[in-house]
């Protein structure tokens, strides 16, 4: 049984990935300090797969505690999700973001440096592309100067991984997510936003259930067919499965270079207004909204070219936007 460490394994994407790993008989250890998750996520995971992963409550940016724990461990792979991710907060507290996101990565890579056969998967973001010149976005699109300290941590972390992979001969894959949405179809795990959700789908479900007021559509004057901005929404379970495929590629030594990078998206762009209509159709719920000013830092349109992931990983998203919205809605109702 291969031992896999999942950092941030009680978070949104992490918890769905833990489920897929356990279902495939991996021996999973989670490190999570509950900075943006809750212990009860373990109950959700256990009720889906009949098994509770080992859980270590550890702040990965704490070098000595991280070293003390990892020095006695033998992992075949690490999937590194643990990071702060609130774009707005990162602008107000950049040092908090650099400390946490960068130190955590470096501390983990110190372990991988001594255990070079340990496969390393990193959670990156399509935000590295900014407003891309060409759509759909391929992996070799230009990396733009980051719009926020959060986005910058993703770029810097990718660079640290690439340089370390070359210098220490490590095996790594960085996965650049487009917009992960939805929840596990069981309704037992999903996203747990703190405070007012900044992301579109959690705001939609909270608004539809009555926790929030009207949804603001940030801008209807973009140069798109209906004027609202376009994103590539990908079901979190599809995304979780991509992590397994990437991990198995490294475990089987099938990677073609020490650092590979893949876009993970559905390949399809949907506008904010299309998402609203899809939500209404998928759930039968009403969703009042109003048009507001554009949100600072938003790009007009971003969707993935998914050919590389299809060719090299043999992975393609299977679930539709409606599936994701139905699952997000089920999760929202269960949480009440
Ligand atoms: C955001 C982050 C991105 C991060 C990703 C993770 C920003 C600028 N970018 O992407 O770095 O990797 O989340 O999921 O925050 N929208 C509304 N009303 C709302 C909320 C959103 O109209 O109340 C619109 C946005 O303007 C955007 C689309 O919905 O056009 C998606 O927004 P969101 O879910 O926040 O994702 P991104 O901004 O694409």
Image (cartoon, rainbow, N blue to C red):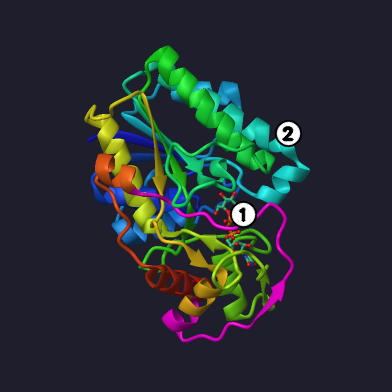
* Residue 282 % position (x, y): 42, 80
Whether the residue under disc 1 has CB within 8 Å of ligand 1: yes
**Foreground residue, 250 or 34?**
250
* Residue 7 % position (x, y): 47, 39
Seen in the image, is 40 located left or right of residue 74?
A: right
Magenta residue check for 3: no
- Residue found 54% across the figure and 30% down from its top: 157
Q: Is residue 12 above or below residue 321?
A: above
Q: Is residue 52 above or below residue 276?
A: above
Q: Quadrant of ligand 1?
A: bottom right
The answer to whether residue 71 is visible is no
Count the numbered circles shown: 2
- Residue found 66% across the figure and 32% down from its top: 98
* Residue 168 % position (x, y): 41, 14
- Find numbered disc 2 in the image and state the secondary structure of the residue it sits on: helix
Q: Is residue 290 above or below residue 158?
A: below
Dot 2 corresponds to which residue?
A: 95
**Foreground residue, 13 or 278?**
278
**Foreground residue, 247 or 330?**
247
Instruction: Name the image quarter holding the C terminus.
Output: bottom right
**Image quarter of residue 263:** top left
| Residue 276 tag number | none
Instruction: Name the image quarter holding the N terminus.
Output: top left
The reply to whether dot 1 and dot 2 touch (C-beta < 8 Å) is: no
Seen in the image, is 254 located left or right of residue 147?
A: left
N-terminal-most mark, 1 or 2: 2
| Labels 1, 2: front one | 1
Boundaries of the magenta span: 279-306
Magenta residue check for 288: yes
Whether the residue under disc 2 has CB within 8 Å of ligand 1: no
Dot 1 corresponds to which residue?
A: 299
């Amino acid at each position: 049984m291969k031992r896999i460490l999942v950092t941030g394994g009680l978070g949104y994407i992490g918890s769905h990935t833990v489920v897929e790993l356990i279902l495939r008989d991996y021996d999973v250890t989670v490190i999570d300090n509950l900075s943006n998750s809750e212990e009860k996520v373990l109950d959700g995971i256990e009720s889906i797969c009949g098994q509770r992963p080992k859980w270590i409550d550890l702040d990965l940016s704490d070098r000595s505690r991280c070293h003390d724990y990892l020095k006695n461990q033998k992992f075949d792979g690490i999937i590194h999700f643990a990071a702060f991710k609130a774009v707005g907060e990162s602008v107000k507290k950049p040092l908090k973001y650099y400390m946490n996101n960068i130190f955590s990565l470096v501390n983990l890579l110190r372990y991988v440096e001594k255990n070079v056969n340990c496969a390393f998967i990193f959670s990156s973001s399509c935000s590295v592309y900014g407003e891309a010149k060409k759509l759909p976005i391929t992996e070799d699109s230009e990396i733009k100067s980051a719009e926020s300290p959060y986005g910058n941590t993703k770029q810097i972390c990718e660079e640290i991984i690439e340089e370390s992979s070359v210098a220490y001969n490590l095996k790594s894959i960085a996965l650049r997510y487009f917009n992960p949405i939805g929840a596990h179809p069981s309704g037992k795990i999903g996203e747990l936003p703190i405070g007012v959700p900044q992301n579109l789908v959690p705001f939609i479900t909270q608004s539809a259930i009555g926790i929030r007021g009207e949804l603001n559509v940030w801008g209807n004057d973009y140069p798109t067919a209906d004027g609202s901005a376009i994103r590539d929404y990908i079901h979190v379970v599809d995304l979780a499965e991509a992590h397994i495929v990437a991990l198995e590629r490294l475990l089987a030594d099938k990677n073609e270079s020490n650092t590979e990078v893949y876009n993970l998206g559905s390949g399809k762009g949907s506008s904010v207004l299309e998402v609203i209509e899809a939500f209404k159709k998928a759930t039968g719920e009403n969703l009042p909204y109003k048009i507001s000013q554009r949100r600072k830092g938003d790009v007009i349109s971003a969707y993935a070219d998914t050919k590389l992931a299809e060719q090299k990983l043999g992975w393609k998203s299977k679930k539709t936007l409606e599936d994701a919205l139905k699952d997000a809605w089920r999760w929202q109702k269960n949480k009440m």
